[in-house]
Structures are given as C-alpha cells and as structure tokens.
Amino acid sequence: NGMFEFQDSINSEKGQYADGLRQGHWEGTLKEGKNKFEEWYAKGVLSKGISTDSMGNVHPYTQRDVPPEYPGGIRNLMIFIAQNYKYPKEALKARVSGQLLISFVVEKNGLTNEFEVINDLGYETAASGIAVLKKAAKWTPGYQYGMPVRVKYSIPIRLHTAPAPN
C-alpha cells in the first residue's frame, strides 16, 4: 500500500497501490516528457485512460497495450497465406519442407513493411513468403496509451511438400 513513483530517462509514472493493486488516479510522461497520460484504476483494473501527444491531441483508451491485429485474426492470415503462397518450382523439385520465419513492422496506419527473413529454407521460399505477406490485407495497428505505434511482428510459415504421385 502507498505511493509508487518510477522515473527513468524516457518515462515516468506515479500513483497509489492498495492491497498490491493500482488504485485511483495515476499519471506520467512518455518519450522524455513529450507525451503525457492519466489513468484511473479500481482494484488494479484500468477503467479509463487519456494520453496527450506532443501535438496536443487527446487519445482516450481502456487498455494500455493493444497489439496489432490482422482482419479476422491470425487464423485468417494463416488461411490467406495457405491459399496464396506460391511454392517456388526449385523448392518443389527439391521437396523443401520446414518453417520459414519472417518478421515485419506493422506501421501506425496498419500497412506492413521492413520485412526480414529470420529463418530461410532456401530455394526462394523466403522471397515467396515475403511476396504473399505483402499481398495480405491491411492490419489494425497496435496502440500504446491510446496512440498508434509501430510494432515488429514475426510470423512462421510452414511449408510441406507431399511425396510425388506414382
């Protein structure tokens, strides 16, 4: 129980704890004081938050961190990839199977970029993975303190070649 204060070179926040949970009014700064926020808690649950960015725009929120989301969820993204991935001919000949891992950034506007191959199976499989991800629908961006943020995301793409028919 009592007052909590935190400050580092970038962020600060302060507020009350009751029974080990956030309680009442909290406030703080982000990005070296460029952005400010206020939050209200009841028994550790955020009921309301308001942030003000460096331009003076106000952003209400009820969750501090909201991850980016593909339309219909990750399951829909996996279905899209499965239906649209173009297996390279050389990879088919070599019967390449395994898991690609590709990372990318979901921008504040929901578009994706900065694709990076983390695990490649060779035979142009990663290039095909990036190509299909670039064709995917626009995401809902991630949010922190009610403000849209860039989020780095990684997605596995499982590839499997069936044995050649007799």
Image (tube, rainbow, N blue to C red):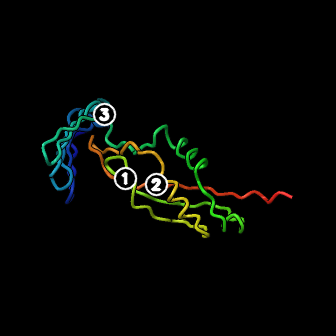
- At x 21%, y 51%, the residue is 30
Q: How many marks?
A: 3
The residue lying at 56 percent from left, 50 percent from top is 81
Classify mark 1: residues with Cα within 10 Å, few (<14), some (14-19) or many (20+).
some
Q: Earlier in the sequence, mark 1 or mark 2?
A: 2
Q: Where is 47 relative to 57, above or below?
A: above
Question: Callout 3: helix, strand or loop?
Answer: loop
Please name the residue that numbered disc 1 is placed on: 151
* Residue 134's disc number: 2
In the image, residue 69 lies at what x, y percent? 43, 43
Distance of label 2 from label 3 (alpha carbons): 31 Å
In the image, what residue type sits under mark 1? Val
Q: Which mark is on residue 62?
A: 3
Q: Position of residue 66 (x, y in %)?
A: 36, 42
Q: Position of residue 115 (x, y in %)?
A: 44, 61
The kind of residue tagged 3 is Thr
**Foreground of the two, 9 or 64:** 64
Give the left or right position of residue 10, taking residue 85 as reference: left
